[in-house]
Image: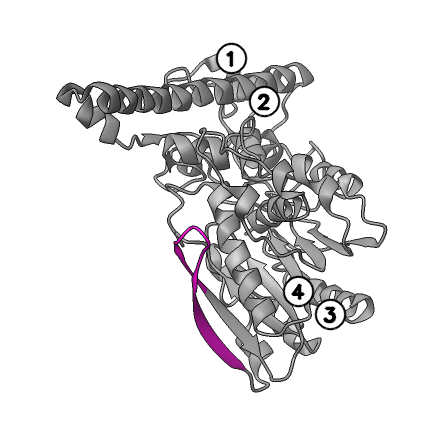
């Protein structure tokens, strides 16, 4: 989108932006929905795309969305592979999403594919799927007794008895560092009262002209001092929300203990209560509004669009409504286990990383750190023009989705 001065701002594409073009799927194929039962007794759904006879399969999954029409499905089929697209147990509703239990969902898909006769399984983590698959891979390659035994909220994972088949390769497409780090980088630290979405410390307000903000399509210009104070305050806000989440959990656990030992009815309600809280103003990554910071081909704006007042205070946003458990496991940049910083070191299988040069959610230095942390001896990285979903940045140019698909097809055929 451009204004009269030819300045450009990001536009939000939503889920539609991650879907294939209809003309990409003209060759006959079958799509088979498969209900799954996880090892911990929950349900999930996968869909197998096939042209028949494949022994190799690409596994695409996101922890919060079921991207059945993902734009890279056609490329897997064109490479002679099947493609399995799966959702987690709570598709489209991440209110209670704990990544530890989402690993059981991944494992259910892996076990199904092995039982179906696929010799080679490659995991493709797109955006938030990268953190999920990196975490799964880390735990699947660990000896059972060394796996994480408790969620960040203190619940037993039972990973030591879990069956986590190991993947043969990993592809990461527009991978951000993990949902917790993504949110911490985007958290507005000028909030002074979590109960009041409008409470603001003006000295930390990222959308104040006094601090360097300019309304898109103009780019902000934040000072080095402001950036340093801002990033420290973001971490402090996460620490405060973490403490609040843990307090809610501890209060409920204490009530359950008292109820169990004394049977006092006064504790029954608190012991049963499942707390929910809101996290406002989660779209304030300075890099989105000041594109001189870690520069790339991106336009001014975030993944949610170019009006920060709408995306920062609107009803839809990352981590907007959470439980204490889902906050700590998924959205806390300090407590979540599902980050590339913690898990990339376990990726030793052949690895492909594709980044988009105009991404408003994944920035060049993030990708540098992810790629450098992967120890695989067989790894490659490609940068193509496109936004977070690989859509073209300019009218008439080749879509980044097409270019990413070309890299994926070649990599699958050459390495497996």
Q: Can residue 370 be seen in this view?
A: yes
Q: Mark 4 points at which residue?
A: 121
Residue 406, how many percent across, how many down?
Answer: 74, 68
Any mark on residue 212, and which?
Answer: 2
Please tell me whether mark 3 sits on a helix, a strand or a loop: helix
Whether the magenta-drawn stretch holds residue 33 is answered as yes
From which residue to which does the magenta span run?
Answer: 30-45
Please tell me whether mark 2 sits on a helix, a strand or a loop: loop
Which is nearer the N-term, disc 3 or disc 4?
A: 4
Relative placement, left or right, of 184 versus 402 is left
Relative placement, left or right, of 271 versus 181 is left
Image quarter where the C terminus lies is bottom right
Specify few, some or many for label 4: CA neighbours under 10 Å numbering under 14, 14-19, or 20 or more: many
Specify few, some or many for label 2: CA neighbours under 10 Å numbering under 14, 14-19, or 20 or more: some
Q: Can residue 283 be seen in this view?
A: no
> Residue at the front extreme?
261
Of the residues tagged 3 and 4, which is closer to the observer? 4
Q: Mark 1 points at which residue?
A: 203
């Amino acid at each position: 989108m451009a204004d009269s001065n030819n300045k450009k701002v990001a536009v939000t594409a939503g889920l539609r932006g991650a879907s294939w073009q209809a003309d990409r799927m003209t060759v006959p194929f079958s799509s088979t929905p498969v209900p799954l039962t996880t090892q911990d007794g929950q349900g999930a759904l996968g869909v197998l795309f096939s042209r028949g006879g494949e022994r190799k399969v690409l596994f695409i999954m996101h922890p919060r969305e079921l991207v059945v029409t993902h734009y890279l499905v056609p490329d897997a089929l064109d490479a002679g592979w099947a493609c399995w697209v799966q959702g987690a147990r709570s598709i489209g509703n991440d209110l209670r999403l704990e990544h530890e239990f989402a690993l059981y969902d991944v494992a259910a898909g892996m076990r199904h594919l092995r039982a179906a006769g696929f010799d080679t399984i490659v995991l493709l983590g797109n955006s938030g799927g990268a953190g999920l698959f990196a975490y799964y891979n880390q735990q699947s390659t660990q000896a059972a007794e060394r796996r994480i035994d408790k969620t960040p909220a203190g619940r037993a994972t039972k990973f030591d008895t879990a069956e986590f088949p190991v993947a043969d390769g990993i592809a990461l497409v527009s991978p951000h560092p993990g949902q917790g780090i993504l949110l911490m980088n985007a958290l507005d630290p000028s909030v002074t009262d979590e109960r009041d979405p409008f409470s603001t410390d003006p000295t930390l307000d990222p959308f104040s002209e006094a601090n360097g903000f300019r309304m898109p399509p103009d780019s902000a210009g934040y000072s080095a001092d402001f950036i340093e104070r801002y990033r420290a305050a973001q971490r402090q806000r996460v620490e405060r929300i973490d403490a609040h989440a843990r307090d809610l959990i501890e209060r409920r656990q204490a009530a359950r203990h008292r109820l169990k030992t004394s049977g006092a009815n006064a504790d029954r309600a608190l012991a049963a209560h499942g707390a929910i809280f809101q996290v406002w103003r989660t779209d304030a990554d300075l890099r989105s509004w000041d594109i001189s910071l870690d520069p790339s081909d991106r336009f001014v704006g975030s993944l949610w669009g170019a009006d920060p007042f709408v995306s920062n205070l609107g009803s839809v946003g990352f981590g907007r409504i959470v439980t204490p458990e889902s906050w700590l496991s998924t959205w806390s940049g300090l407590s979540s286990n599902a980050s590339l910083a913690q898990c990339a070191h376990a990726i030793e299988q052949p690895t492909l990383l594709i980044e988009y040069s105009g991404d408003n959610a994944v920035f060049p230095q993030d990708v540098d750190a992810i790629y450098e942390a992967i120890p695989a001896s067989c790894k490659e990285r490609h940068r193509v023009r496109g936004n977070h979903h690989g859509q073209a940045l300019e009218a008439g140019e080749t879509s980044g989705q097409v270019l990413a698909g070309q890299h994926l097809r070649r990599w699958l055929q050459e390495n497996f």
